[in-house]
Image (spheres, coloured by chain):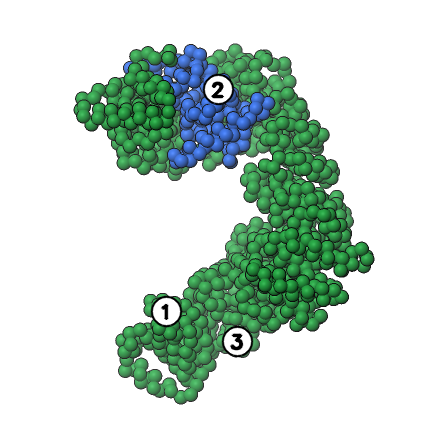
Chain colours: A green, B blue
Amino acid sequence: MPTVAKGDGMRGLAVFISDIRNCKSKEAEQKRINKELANIRSKFKGDKTLDGYNKKKYVCKLLFIFLLGHDIDFGHMEAVNLLSSNKYTEKQIGYLFISVLVNTDSALIRLIIQAIKNDLEARHPVHICLALQCIANIGSKEMAEALTKEIPKLIVSGETIDAVKQSACLCLLRLFRTSPETVPPGEWTQRVGHLLNDQHLGVVTSATSLIHTLAQKTPEDFKPCVQLAISRLSRIVTSSYTDLQDYTYYFVPAPWLSVKLLRLLQVYPPPEDPALRGRLNECLETILNKAQEPPKSKKVQHSNAKNAVLFEAINLIIHHDTEPSLLVRACNQLGQFLQHRETNLRYLALESMCLLASSEFSHEAVKKHMDTVITALKTERDVSVRQRAVDLLYGMCDKSNAEEIVAEMLSYLETADYSIREEMVLKVAILAEKYPVDYTWYVDTILNLIRIAGDYVSDEVWYRVIQIVINRDDVQGYAAKVVFEALQAPACHENMVKVGGYILGEFGNLIAGDQRSSPMVQFQLLHSKYHLCSAPTRGLLLSTYIKFINLFPEIKGQLQDVLRNNNNLQNADAELQQRAIEYLQLSTVASQDVLATVLEEMPPFPERESSILAKLKKKKPNVSDIEVVKEGKKSSNPPTLNNSAANTPEATPASAPVPVMAAAPAPAPVQSASDDLLGLSAGPAAAAPVTNNFAAPAAPAGGGGLLVDVFDTPPAQNNVSTALAPQAEENFFNMPSGETAPSGDASATELDGRFAIKNNGVLFENELLQIGVKAEYKGNLGRLGLFYGNKTSYPFQFFTPTVSCPGELASAMNVQTKPLDVNTVEGGAQVQQIINVECIADFVDAPILSIKFSYSGSMQQINLMLPVMLNKFFEPVEMDATSFFNRWKQLSSPGQEEQKIFKASFPINSDTSRTKLLGFGFGLLDGVDPNPDNFVGAGIIKAQSSQVGCLLRLEPNMQAQMYRLTLRTSSKSVTTRLADLLLKLF
Amino acid sequence: MIRFILIQNRAGKTRLAKWYMQFDDDEKQKLIEEVHACVTVRDAKHTNFVEFRNFKIVYRRYAGLYFCICVDVNDNNLMYLEAIHNFVEVLNEYFHNVCELDLVFNFYKVYSVVDEMFLAGEIRETSQTKVLKQLLMLNSLE
């Protein structure tokens, strides 16, 4: 039995706990608990005169039962009662029960808050402390709102005793974390800073945590603390271990406080005042010196405490990153630890060194330890240490050692733990791309990666190698040769087949001259893998075959046989079936010229951040910081292949404008299920470009953006879904593909149908750019606000939007565009442009907005239609039944009436139809038509040259799901145009 | 900051669980099981630090008990490792040669010890003398 029990030992509780421990089975335990619960319940219910001791005992038993894992649904009230006891032991149990068990949304919370308030004002400091601890333990929003203002005065008052100050500091910290807005800075903030000078080191310890957190939010408010923290730290590190008595731990003076102070200093840059800075550097040097002194004790506690301070000092040195001598000393110290017999120290040294590697001052010094780190990678028993070694190798890698490090990582990969393989693959892929010795080496490395750890090679990795091979024509022949060789292995990974299929499809012709890799041999080699592959890979191979038909007309027959094979033509997989049918048809129908254009070699990809790096960042959020710091320090360029390539002498400047997409004159629309084709998931995305060319006529939406996006998300789906977004309303303008864009670089994006009845919304969106529109119309005038938002983190340069009115529109509409004030749109920024339009006569086509800009070196062009339709200049008219019918009769000559009977594209709903007609601009005339289901409306088109009155009758037929639409106006062209617009709304 | 403190025995029975951030009961149970699975498989040659979800567990084994502190990944590992030891020394002094049973029978007192030394996920007091003095004073109260 425990020995501490003094006056407050609860015998009944001890007996109960013993009973539970003696239970032989779960059932027996449950029985004993049920018995106890029944007993406690009857005590709480029956005996009104239950004294404090018994109440405490039973509440404590309930708590014990809860901690065993049983639900407790009573006793809360009794616990709250205990709070108002003036005996410490009873209060303590009450508070404990509440902290552990009471939900923050409990109905009792108000009672509890009142009890806490009382205790905060109690005379006995012990009661104040209990209340503060309870707040700090629960820390709910209600508590923050009700109690925060009580706390600061406890912290700064001269009368508060130290223990209360300590608890109050941390209590405030908890409330600040819960809801910072309830902790307004005030006069107390300054005085909190002075607690760093407090005599009581326990108070300083608590206060430092509070200040650290507050300073992270508003560093300016706590700037004076820097000086206080440095002088406090200096006093600690220069003291002997006997000075601080209570706070010396195994001969180390105040290790925890030292660490906290060093962390607080990491909120700020190095002090500007030279004297202060000198003093801090002295402290840091002293700490580094102490690491070299012989230990004062052999106990691990001594060295741990000492090294805790040392590692935090090194963190501060790295954070400041301004003192080369300190950085190099830190590096040497860590170097010693790399070979220490304590695993903990080796682990922590690897971790810290990873940070050091990113400093330009110590990067070279870190590299000296490469061999040790490689040994660690091979010999450490603890996988988390090996993981750190991988991180450090990655961190210290640069052009000079990339070849060796990549080779070591590749060889380790063969035996690496499964848990870290995928991450290692990403790291190898990034290093190989970032520091390519030359591009043949790069290709070799990635293929090795696939060979060794194919299962762990994510799609991003093999997309990327293809992207790079396509962008660099000096490596294409080599790539074709090595994938051809790699494919000859009897068992090769499916990812290898994908890369091989893609690269041979594009560049197989470069090695076809050799008899050993003649077209037929290439084809047979690929096709020998076909049946072993999953559907997405087969899809990719089918695309390769159609490309072969173009590259090698001499084997067209054999290829068509494969396409024609029933396994493909009637494949259960719709995607494969579709590809087989379409490719077969394409190869039969299209002339060699058309085929050559459709299947033209892929144009280079625009340079952008490596998708692999993005994936690594996503995987390890904490890595990204390091990465960002590192990139920021080494160069301000985004880490793409091209940037690093630009550093290598043989690289060609790659900033010349690259057309985003080769104009692809579309073959006859193959079929209408374009979204099936476009809906390819990421798997066969690399094959998608070919397919996209097919789909172009059916869905030119964002065609220009497609290629850009191939390597990120499944882009096609994005485009389809935005184009058809809200309730799949039909696209209003189905632009014939022939007249897409004047330049042919990017096809004009279709207008979204919903703009016919709406004035605001997102007009266009792709990976780079979002365009929002807000429009107002009055009479024949309109005003459009366009908002161009840059979604990337790099600027768009030479950003020039222009609006043009093609053809007849030029005489029907005046458009005035205010030029932009700036021609650069910064990353993440938005600029606005106002466009005024004036309708002169009725019109059909919409004005075209064409935007050109340069994004990381390549020109982008986007052509869009502005959402300006004839009905925007439409004003509703009210009239009674008689005048309606009079006018209706007047407009009965041929050409004035247009009648359409059509099938409903959307479910027939009276309310929706009403909204659509009103949004379109009609005034609705109720009670004119005898049939209440029909709609009758009137309005006027307000063009400058003429005003055209317009009458409408819309008759829905629920049974047939049909509409009859009748429009009468005085102008034939207006009638036709409005009918066309309306037709697509219903 | 500290996210939670757990004391578990080798069989996975929890002897103390102190939470410094909001988890619901199911989540707490899951964390307890995961931590147990995570630390008990490690041997003495391994580090005292394990990555755990987005956090890090700093732990040390004393006889059959694992003392685990879950902290942020960029926190100072050694500082928390020694905080565990400091805490254990206080328990040892307070209970005169602490054993697992002391923690069972006096579970409500262990919470008091924790609150003296750690609060709001931060280290509150590190002086063993001061903590013990305060605890003895509390013990003398009715």
Residue for point 49% across, 68% down: A731
Q: Is residue A610 left or right of residue A265?
A: right
Label 2 or label 3, whichever lies nearer to me, is: 2
Residue at the (48%, 23%) spot, across then down? B10
Q: Picture coordinates of residue A139 (x, y %)? A: 37, 32
Q: Which residue is mark 1?
A: A908
> Which residue is more in the foreground, A830 or A352?
A352
Front residue (pair A215, A315)? A315
Quarter-of-image position of residue A939: bottom left
User: Considering only order in the chain, which callout, 3 or 1, is on the residue closer to the N terminus?
Assistant: 3
The picture quadrant where one finds residue A956 is bottom left
| Badge 1 element | loop
Q: Is residue A507 visible?
A: no
**Mark 2 sits on what residue?**
B64
Give the CA separation, mark 1 to mark 3.
Answer: 35 Å
Relative to A413, residue A903 above or below? below
Could you say which disc has been placed on residue A809 in the image?
Answer: 3
The circle on residue A239 is none
Q: Residue type at mark 3: give it.
A: Leu
Label 2 crowd (10 A; few <14 / some 14-19 / many >=20): few
Label 1 amino acid? Ile
Q: How many marks?
A: 3
Q: Chain of mark 3?
A: A
What type is the residue that disc 2 sits on?
A: Gly
Chain on which label 1 sits = A
Residue A593, given in percent of the width and then of the height, sits at: 71, 70
* Chain letter of the residue carrying label 2: B
